[in-house]
Image (spheres, grey):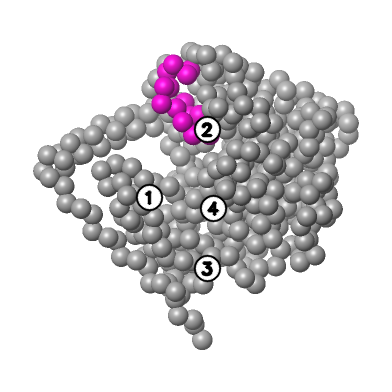
Amino acid sequence: MPHAPKHQPPKLPKLPKKTAEETAIAAAEKKIAEAEKKEAEKLGSKLLREMPLTPLHSYKIASDEEMSAAFTEYQTSGLVAIDFFESAAQKEDYCERASTSIWNETFGACQFKPEINSAVPYIKTAEDLAAIRGPGFAESARGKSLREAAGDSPTPHANFGATCFGVSFNLKVAHEIRSNHRLAEFAQMAMGPNSNVHYTIDRAINKLPNKGGKEFMHVDEQPFHESWTDETKRLVKVMHGKMVVSEGGTFIACPGSHLESGEITRLYKPLYPKASGMKFQLDPTREDPLNIYGRTRKFIIEPGTIVFWNSLTFHGVTENTSKRVQQGLYIGFQSKINRELYSERAEVEEVTDRYNTWRKGVAPKLFPSCDKVHLVPFKFTNFPHLMASYLKKVDPLSPKFDFTYRAIASGSNKGVMTPNLKEIPDADYIPFPLSQRAREMLVGAENVHRFDFSLA
């Protein structure tokens, strides 16, 4: 028998009326801001889309010599591609399992209304898998069925291609890679012999055709942030990575830019006086003293390959202009899991938050960069009609969501309460078992005794 919902989806509250003058001023400011944004996006997309594709050599790391060669490339370029599978068959099997898991569990977590959910083309057979991974998905019957059922944005964060549901951070196929001993050895080499090695907890990627940021060229560590001058908060020893499991994978980066952090701080800070947040994004309409855009390359990444990049390497994402679904996993490593900055922003010890993510199957409070994790895009806070549009798709009987409110963050309607959605942890969730190495990489060898791992 279906249970009664805790709350019905809240109705969009009426916003306070503005005077004619206030409305005109707000409209003019919005028009200017939108024009500037479109100009930047258009230029950024043009620069990155027209960039020729460049093959990126992938290193096998089965031997110490291969490991050393990969490390040299990472030191020099600030990025490296690694293929660690022992055979082509093993690689193909993993990519197919990962594709199925990412697709089914991403859409399963959406908790669509029954009429929408029944039209989602879940992968149940080999034929389904081939169709989803095929080159013509955008124009296929399955692709059209998904668009018609769930709309243009079937999941939160659809444009970026990586949802923030708890399951997205806790796929078993991701843990298979996170605790791989050869990758851990490479991370140890990359971050230094005296560094501890812990895997990062990040999302799965499921980017549909015609989705993706128009332009997003950035570094994962803000070069003007206080963490650069406060060693107790420093984030430098983070090696980010993306595991590609589908055809058509690409990665955009500026090789060698990680070696120019001092010059970037000196030359770019005056150009971005209002820069804030944990990341730093380039605006293609502004001066580019080191010609970051001009030196950027778009690399082809084969399925079953991980590309790692330094947190100070400029890299970017673009719209998925292919007719394929682009799938992958963010896989990385970090040297610290007791960061003061994390505790301050998350209001919980980083080690404890990492354990809870695994134990309860929930999303972490923060990303590895210490940016906050939001179940729905943060822009929904300022644009409540977007949230209302998504709520229309959600099953009000779902036990996994709580319908609530949050305040508009800025602008003339700052403080006005708008609809929000929160994910409720599954009380019956059973975490998958972790090896001793995986436990140590999750919470640190010195902290394993503090937590109960017998529950899996």
- Circle 1 sits on which residue? 381
Badge 4, how many Cα within 10 Å: few under 14, some, many 20+?
Answer: many
Reading the chain from its start, which is encountered first: label 1 or label 2? Answer: 2
Left or right, residue 241 beside residue 212? right
Q: Are marks 1 and 2 in contact (CB under 8 Å)?
A: no
Q: Earlier in the sequence, mark 4 or mark 3?
A: 4
Q: Read off the residue under disc 3.
A: 400
Q: CA distance from mark 4 to mark 3?
A: 14 Å
**Mark 2 highlights which residue?**
279
- Which residue type does callout 2 highlight? Lys
SS under mark 2:
loop
Secondary structure of the residue carrying numbered label 4? loop
Tell me the amino acid under the disc marked 3: Lys
Give the image location of residue 220, x and y in percent: 57, 33
| Structural distance between the alpha carbons of marks 1 and 2 | 20 Å
Answer whether residue 275 is magenta in the image.
yes
Q: For the magenta stretch, what is the residue range?
A: 268-282
Dots 1, 3 in contact, CB < 8 A:
no
Callout 1 amino acid:
Thr
Residue 118 location, x and y as percent?
Answer: 48, 72
Which mark is first along the chain, 3 or 1? 1
Residue 150 drawn at (x, y percent): 42, 62
The residue that mark 4 highlights is 164
User: Residue 448 at what x, y percent from top left?
Assistant: 80, 52
In percent of the image, x 58 and y 65: which residue is there?
Answer: 425
Using the numbered discs, state the Cα–Cα distance from disc 4 to disc 1 in whole angstroms: 16 Å
Residues under labels 1 and 3: Cα distance?
Answer: 21 Å
Q: Is residue 326 above or below residue 360?
A: above
Whether residue 390 is visible, yes or no, is no
Dot 1 lies on which element?
helix
